Image (cartoon, coloured by chain):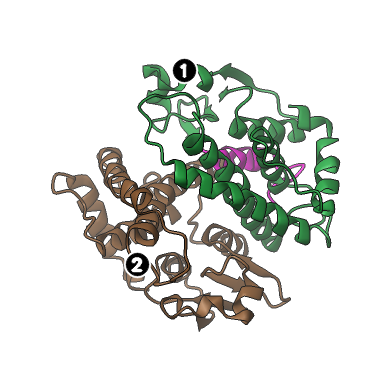
Chain colours: A green, B brown
């Protein structure tokens, strides 16, 4: 089994933290998306969407998409649970994971790819106005999350989950472009400090 | 338990088919997004993202996002499995579900909301160029899926899954705007005929 990873990219970090929380250690290969290595013929064959993370199983099957890779490891090693145990918790984690994935990681990534030079691909379609429109969306999501975190410790409830991992990576990625946690979002800032202190946040 | 549904909208249909496949019958309330009912104070309180489908559990918890609602029912009633049984199948369904959700449902919805009058909301941010850019993306996804379906019966493998439901709803929704299956995509057309013939496709 091999994980195609890229240090410095937002989605691979989600899986590195996920695996570190579960204590899973696997072979990794670096695909440097900042140098365009995802466009190589070999990698495009593995993942036609040319994105990391990507997991190659021992039987040759390839799993791309962070949510799918997380699902695989949750099923092979359920403890500690990061996707929820009861049906309700599984649904709440899936819901919040999706909300912060779209509102933080997705919106920040859209800003990065459309309103900045992104990964430097000269031939990539860019719509600067669309990119700029996603910047306030990140801030709105942060404000919404701040209100939600007034009543609980973690994004999807009282337990650390994949939703926290996605939100942490989203907040940190947005911060690279100056989209910081608003000063009055004290609950979000406290949560961010709490999850950043976990040793796995360095993964 | 109550499902907030909307006949004619793409994402609620995904859950109606999912429930029909499992033989689950629950109370439904219609939220007519074509009349703007998702903006009512009552519904906004249930789902701040103002979108259907949305599931209210008996304890008052609210689950929005189609993937999260599907996850809830897969956990409460595992048979027939629509999200995969083995770790590998779970991952493949999650991966393909996401791919067709983004490339078909998401791209067609972006075209609808940005390049057309969408739901008729006068104050909605629109970026016509971004909407138009998503139209060829739907067609590209159809062509990719056509190649993949040369080797297997269903989107995620040999078994009907939530990935097929999402793809079916995406293809049908795109068809409403004249984005049809390209004539030379015979494998995709055969798959579409096959899944459309299931009685649950009418749900």
Q: Secondary structure at mark 1?
A: helix
Seen in the picture, residue B83 relative to B96 is either above or below; the reply is below
Q: Position of residue A23 (x, y in %)?
A: 76, 30
Instruction: Say left or right for B103 vs A168.
Output: left
- Please say whether residue A72 is one of the residues in the magenta stretch: yes
Q: Residue at x 53, y 76 (%)?
A: B38
Helix, strand or loop at label 2? It is loop
Chain under callout 1:
A
In the picture, the quarter occupied by the N terminus of chain A is top right
Q: Please provide the residue range marked out in magenta.
A: A65-83
Q: Chain of mark 2?
A: B
Kindly identify which residue carries mark 2. Answer: B117
Q: Give the residue drawn at x 65%, y 31%.
A: A13
Q: Position of residue A63 (x, y in %)?
A: 49, 34
* Crowd tier of the residue under label 1, counting other residues whose Cα lies within 10 Å: few below 14, some 14–19, many 20 or above: some
Q: CA distance from mark 2 to mark 1?
A: 40 Å
> In the drawing, what numbered circle is on residue A37?
1
Q: Which of the 4 image quarters holds residue A21? A: top right
């Amino acid at each position: 089994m091999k994980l195609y990873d890229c240090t410095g990219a937002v989605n691979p970090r989600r899986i590195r933290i996920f695996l570190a929380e579960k204590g899973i250690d696997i072979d990794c290969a670096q695909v440097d998306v900042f140098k365009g290595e995802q466009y190589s013929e070999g990698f495009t064959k593995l993942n036609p969407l040319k994105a990391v993370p990507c997991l190659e199983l021992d039987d040759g099957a390839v799993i791309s998409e962070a949510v799918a890779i997380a699902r695989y490891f949750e099923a092979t090693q359920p403890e500690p649970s990061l996707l929820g145990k009861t049906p309700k918790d599984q649904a709440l984690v899936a819901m919040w994971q999706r909300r912060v994935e779209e509102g933080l990681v997705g919106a920040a990534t859209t800003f990065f790819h459309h309103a900045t030079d992104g990964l430097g691909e000269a031939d990539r379609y860019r719509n600067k106005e669309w990119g700029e429109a996603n910047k306030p969306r990140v801030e709105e999501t942060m404000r919404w999350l701040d209100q939600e975190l007034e009543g609980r410790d973690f994004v999807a409830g009282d337990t650390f989950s994949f939703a926290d991992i996605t939100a942490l990576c989203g907040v940190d990625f947005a911060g690279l472009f100056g989209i910081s946690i608003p000063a009055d979002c004290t609950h979000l800032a406290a949560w961010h400090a709490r999850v950043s202190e976990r040793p796995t946040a360095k993964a």
